[in-house]
Image (cartoon, rainbow, N blue to C red):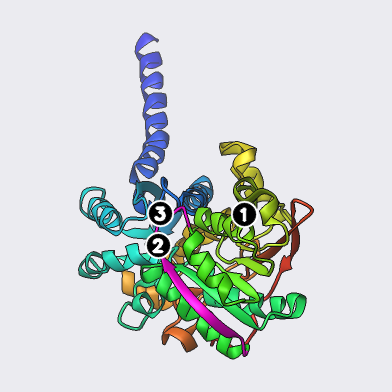
C-alpha cells in the first residue's frame, strides 16, 4: 500500500513538473530589447528633457504591461536606459558610446539637433535606428540619414499654424527671431524663414545667443530697435525663452511674443510673472486631458510622479515606443533599415488621433512626425487654451 501511495505521489509530481516546465520555459524565453534615451536631465533645457524621458519610458511600460510583443514566436519586452547629455554634444556622444557598446541598446532616442548630429557617425557605423526629439533641419533630416527620425512635433508644422493665427489675432507683419547659436537654432531660423515667406511676413532681424545665457538685454535692445510686431523665440530652450519674454517686457516691448517651442506654461509664469501676460505659447498638447485616451496618459503619469510635475510636453513621446513596437510586429524584424522603410508609410493611433511621418517636401524624405501643437495665451495671469490646430495640408509636403 505504501509503495502504491509513493508511486501515485510520484506521478502527481511528474505531472505538475510537466505543466510547470513549459510555463517556466516561456518566462525564461522572454528577452529584453534595450532602448536608450539620451536626454537633458539637467541644465536650462531640462524642462524639455525630463518630460521627454518620462513620456518615452511610460510608453515602454504600456507595451510591457500588455505582455510585450512577439517576433517569430519569441516574446520580447523593453528595457529603458537613460543618460544625461546636459544638452552638450560631447556628453551626448559619450552617452551614445555607452548606450551602443556597453548597454547594447538596439534603438535610441536623442534630444537636441546638435546632439544628434554629433552622434551621427556612431549611429551610421552601427546601423542604429533613432527616433529623436530634436531640431537640426536638413543637416540632420535628409535622404543620407534614412535611419534618423524626428519624433518631436516639427517646428515647421508649428509655424504653419501659429504664424497665420498671429496674423489674424494680432495683425503681425514683421517678426524678430531668436535662436541658440548651434545646429538646432539655425534649423529654427530656417523653419521660421520658410513659413514667413509662405505667409508673406518680413523677418526684420534674426539673432543668435550662446546656449546657457541668462542676460539677453543687449540682444533684445537691438531687436526692439527694429520695431517688430512679433518677437519669436523659435527653437530657444524653455528657460531661456521665458527669460527673454520677461526681459523684453522690462525693456518696454509692447508687441506680441511667441514662446514657440514647448514651454511649460507653469514655468513661464514662474519665471516671467506678470511680464508673461498676452504671450503666446506653442506646446505639445493641452495642460488638461481633452479625451479618455489623454486622461489615461495623465492618470499613468500621476501614478508615478507628483501631479504638480505634470507638463504638457509629455504628450507626443508617449507613443514613441508603441509606434516602434507596432513597426517591429508588422515587419517581424529588428533590422533597422527594414523598420525605417516601414515607419515611413505607417500610420498609428494616438491620444491625438492618427499620426504619421511626413515633410518630404521640406527634407526630401518622410522622417518628421506630423503632430499638431496646442496654442495657449497668458490671459489674466493664467494660460488659456486656444486650441490644438491641425497642420495645413499641401503646404509642406
- Give the number of the disc on residue 112: 2
Q: CA distance from mark 2 to mark 3?
A: 14 Å
Does the rendering let one see residue 339?
A: no
Pinpoint residue 136: horizontal percent, then vertical percent. 39, 72
- Residue sitting at x 30%, y 56%: 92
Q: Is residue 267 magenta?
A: no
Per the rendered image, the range of residues in magenta is: 200-215
- Give the number of the disc on residue 147: none
- Give the number of the disc on residue 212: 3
Instruction: Count up the numbered dots.
Output: 3
**Which image quarter: residue 161?**
bottom right
Callout 1: helix, strand or loop?
helix
- Residue sitting at x 51%, y 70%: 222
The tag earlier along the polypeptide, 3 or 1, is 3
The tag earlier along the polypeptide, 2 or 1, is 2
Pinpoint residue 313: horizontal percent, then vertical percent. 57, 56
Pinpoint residue 316: horizontal percent, then vertical percent. 56, 61
Q: Residues within 10 Å of mark 1 (few under 14, many from 20)?
A: many
- Residue sitting at x 37%, y 55%: 87
- Residue sitting at x 64%, y 59%: 249
**Which image quarter: residue 184?**
bottom left
Callout 2: helix, strand or loop?
loop
- Give the number of the disc on residue 312: 1
- Nearest to viewer (mark 2 / mark 3): 3
Pinpoint residue 377: horizontal percent, then vertical percent. 72, 62
Front-lying residue, 378 or 51: 378
Amino acid at each position: 500500500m505504501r509503495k502504491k501511495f509513493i508511486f501515485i505521489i510520484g506521478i502527481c509530481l511528474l505531472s505538475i513538473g510537466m505543466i510547470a516546465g513549459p510555463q517556466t520555459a516561456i518566462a525564461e524565453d522572454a528577452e529584453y530589447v534595450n532602448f536608450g534615451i539620451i536626454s537633458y536631465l539637467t541644465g536650462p533645457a531640462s524642462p524639455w528633457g525630463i518630460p521627454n524621458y518620462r513620456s518615452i519610458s511610460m510608453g515602454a511600460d504600456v507595451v510591457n504591461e500588455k505582455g510585450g510583443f512577439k517576433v517569430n514566436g519569441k516574446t520580447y519586452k523593453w528595457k529603458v536606459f537613460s543618460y544625461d547629455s546636459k544638452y552638450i554634444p560631447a556628453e551626448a556622444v559619450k552617452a551614445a558610446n555607452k548606450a551602443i557598446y556597453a548597454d547594447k541598446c538596439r534603438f535610441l532616442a536623442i534630444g537636441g539637433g546638435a546632439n544628434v548630429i554629433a552622434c551621427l557617425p556612431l549611429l551610421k557605423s552601427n546601423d542604429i535606428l533613432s527616433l529623436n526629439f530634436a531640431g537640426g533641419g536638413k543637416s540632420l533630416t535628409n535622404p543620407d540619414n534614412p535611419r534618423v527620425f524626428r519624433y518631436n512635433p516639427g517646428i515647421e508644422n508649428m509655424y504653419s499654424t501659429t504664424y497665420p493665427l498671429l496674423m489674424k489675432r494680432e495683425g503681425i507683419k514683421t517678426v524678430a527671431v531668436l535662436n541658440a547659436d548651434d545646429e538646432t537654432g539655425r534649423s529654427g531660423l530656417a523653419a521660421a524663414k520658410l513659413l514667413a515667406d509662405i505667409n508673406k511676413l518680413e523677418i526684420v532681424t534674426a539673432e543668435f545667443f550662446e546656449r546657457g545665457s541668462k542676460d539677453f538685454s543687449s540682444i533684445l535692445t537691438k531687436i526692439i530697435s527694429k520695431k517688430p510686431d512679433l518677437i519669436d523665440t523659435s527653437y530657444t530652450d524653455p528657460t531661456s525663452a521665458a527669460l527673454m519674454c520677461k526681459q523684453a517686457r522690462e525693456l518696454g516691448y509692447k508687441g506680441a511674443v511667441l514662446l514657440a517651442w514647448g514651454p511649460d506654461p507653469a514655468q513661464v509664469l514662474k519665471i516671467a510673472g506678470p511680464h508673461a501676460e498676452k504671450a503666446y505659447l506653442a506646446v505639445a498638447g493641452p495642460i488638461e486631458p481633452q479625451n479618455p485616451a489623454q486622461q489615461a496618459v495623465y492618470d499613468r503619469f500621476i501614478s508615478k510622479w507628483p501631479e504638480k510635475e505634470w507638463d504638457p510636453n509629455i504628450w507626443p513621446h508617449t507613443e514613441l515606443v508603441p509606434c516602434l513596437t507596432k513597426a517591429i510586429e508588422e515587419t517581424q524584424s529588428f533590422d533597422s533599415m527594414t523598420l525605417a522603410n516601414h515607419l515611413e508609410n505607417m500610420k498609428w493611433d494616438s491620444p491625438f488621433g492618427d499620426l504619421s511621418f511626413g515633410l518630404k517636401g521640406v527634407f526630401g524624405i518622410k522622417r518628421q512626425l506630423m503632430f499638431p501643437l496646442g496654442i495657449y495665451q497668458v490671459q489674466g495671469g493664467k494660460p488659456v487654451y486656444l486650441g490644438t490646430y491641425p497642420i495645413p495640408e499641401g503646404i509642406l509636403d
